[in-house]
Image (spheres, rainbow, N blue to C red):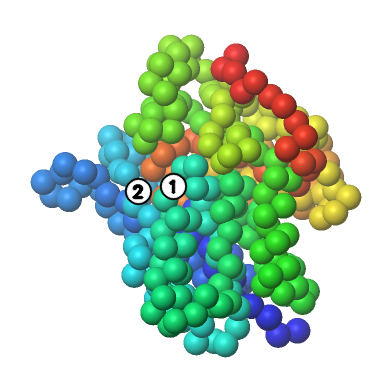
Amino acid sequence: MPALFNLLSDSTCDFSVEDSTRMDVTILPFTYTEAGKADGGFHGVDDQFQSRSAHEFYQAIRDGAAPMTSQPSQLVFEEAFRSALETGLPSVLFCITSALSGGYNGACTALDRLKEEMGTDDLPIYIVDCGVTSTAQYLMVEQAARMRDNGATAQEVYEWALEARYHVQTLFMVDNLDTLHRGGRVPKGVAVVAGALDAKPMLTFNLDGSLKIVGVSRGRNKGMKRLVKFYEESHDSSQYGSVVAIGNADCPEDLERYIELLKKADPSVRIMTSNIGPTIGCHVGPGMMSCVCWGADRRLKKGKGLLK
């Protein structure tokens, strides 16, 4: 069945080149750079680990690199929209949560400028604020591709996404909170406490798309078991089947163990894996592991989100 619309996402969805090619998703890249370095420091484009491998990228951070990210420029968004319009098909763009980045607002501004230039408010381009990012955004875009391939329209997928984002259940573990603090995503005091405890912080997303610390694990093995328990307690297979998306930031041995634990917990589960890309990797650092699945409406749940 011919596709009824173009599907786009910013690079925070952590798709590999193989993923974006197989699912026919256009990726709009973020960039990263190390400020204040005379030689330009550690910098590049989030090109889905084509210019440098995941291990090379994260090893540089282990060795002291401290890159920060920049969202796609207005020109990148405008050129992507122009190319999409030339196909004669509507388009849907999935963006990182606006609580963590200006990418969504940048895309909306670029679209408004294009509408003004063309003298119409009726351009068939839909922009989704995912309310999540990384592996959670991967899960959303993957399902959107399935819907498109099964005949859903752009508007149907857009309206679905605005509700589906609240059914994405996410838990991820980081080695420490240093990079998240450096990027302004968590307060310094919380990062210091977590470091002093030598604990592995566990985080999720608030309903507004910001980050929330929901606990800590003593060691990575316990952390992986907590991620698996989270899947068991949170997933709902009634609509999309037993599916889980898991990400890792250059910890392949842990990933293998993690997959074994998931398969033991649910032999029927369909597991999708991704490398945490450079954009998110700049903020979480090496060692992050995530668990994302479809579940109940998060708007019906209440949590304190305390470090404990």
Q: Residue at x 39, y 79 (%)?
A: 117
Looking at the picture, which amino acid does disc 1 mark? Ser
Q: Residue at x 53, y 37 (%)?
A: 210
Query: Mark 1 to mark 2: distance in Å?
Result: 10 Å
Q: Is residue 201 left or right of residue 42?
A: right
Q: Is residue 187 left or right of residue 18?
A: left
Q: Is residue 49 visible?
A: no
- Residue 155 to residue 197: above or below: below
Q: How many marks?
A: 2
Please provide percent x and percent y for residue 293.
72, 45
| Quadrant (top left, top right, bottom left, bottom right) of the C terminus | top right
**Numbered tag placed on residue 69 in the rendering:** 2
Of mark 1 and mark 2, the one earlier in the sequence is 2
Q: Is residue 247 left or right of residue 50?
A: right
Please provide percent x and percent y for residue 276.
50, 48
| Quadrant (top left, top right, bottom left, bottom right) of the N terminus | bottom right
Mark 1: which secondary structure? loop
**Numbered tag placed on residue 101 in the rendering:** 1
**Towards the viewer: 82 or 174:** 82
- Residue 217 in which image quadrant: top right
- Residue 177 to residue 245: above or below: above
Cβ–Cβ below 8 Å for labels 1 and 2?
yes
Q: Residue furthest right?
A: 238
